[in-house]
Amino acid sequence: MLVRVLKRRTSLEVSAEDFCRIELTTRDGQPDLNLSVYEAHSVGEVAQLYVEHAVSHISPPGKRAVLDVAGAGSPGILPTPGAAKFELAAERHRELLFEDAQSLQLFGRQVLEEADERRVDYGKGQVYDLVRQLRQDPAWDQGLQAAPQAARWLAKL
């Protein structure tokens, strides 16, 4: 599985054009031809990768959606070291490489059309329960302590 953490859960409720604008662009509004994803080998890993991504990059989350984008379009896949604070997310980070904006748009349209089959949702309670479980590992807890939003995460636990 190749999983993409969506910027907004509500992105699945908009037009294909808006989905691509919200989810498939860089911070400066350009098409993201090197789209970040994580390679998961099991459903359990999807959950852990989502949590590790969230702790590394997001304040304590509301509801977020994750999409399995494997098989959508035909981008190249490049293993790249991730910026996450945790070993699994850093090891499993990949970039989907698109030739041009058109191939990225086709990918986005396909993913949105198939979102019901590709979607995995995690509620706040599930996220916090998994974080509590993962904190049993001292190395994982150390990653949490080093996260940019650590104080906010720890206050929620």
Image: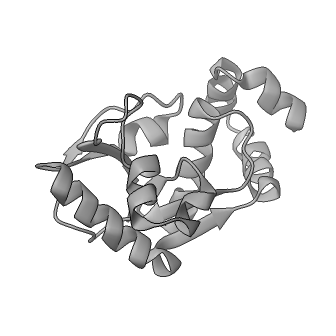
Q: Residue furthest left?
A: 99
Query: What residue is at 73 percent from the left and 52 percent from the top?
Result: 127
Residue at 42 percent of width and 70 percent of height: 112
User: How many numbered discs?
Assistant: 0
- In this picture, is 50 found above or below 145? below
Q: As drawn, is 32 to the left or to the right of 54? A: left
Instruction: Report x, y in % for residue 48.
Output: 58, 51
Instruction: Write the residue at 21% across / 67% down.
Output: 73
Q: Could you say which is closer to the camera, residue 36 or residue 26?
A: 26
Asked whether the viewer can see residue 76, the reply is no
Whether residue 143 is situated above or below residue 52 in the rendered picture: above
Rendered-image quadrant of the C terminus: top right
User: Going by the image, does 19 lie left or right of 94?
Assistant: right
Relative to 69, is 59 above or below?
A: above
Location of residue 51 in the rendering, given as x and y in whole percent from the top left corner: 62, 46
Q: Quadrant of the N terminus?
A: bottom left
x and y, in percent, of residue 79 in the image: 24, 42
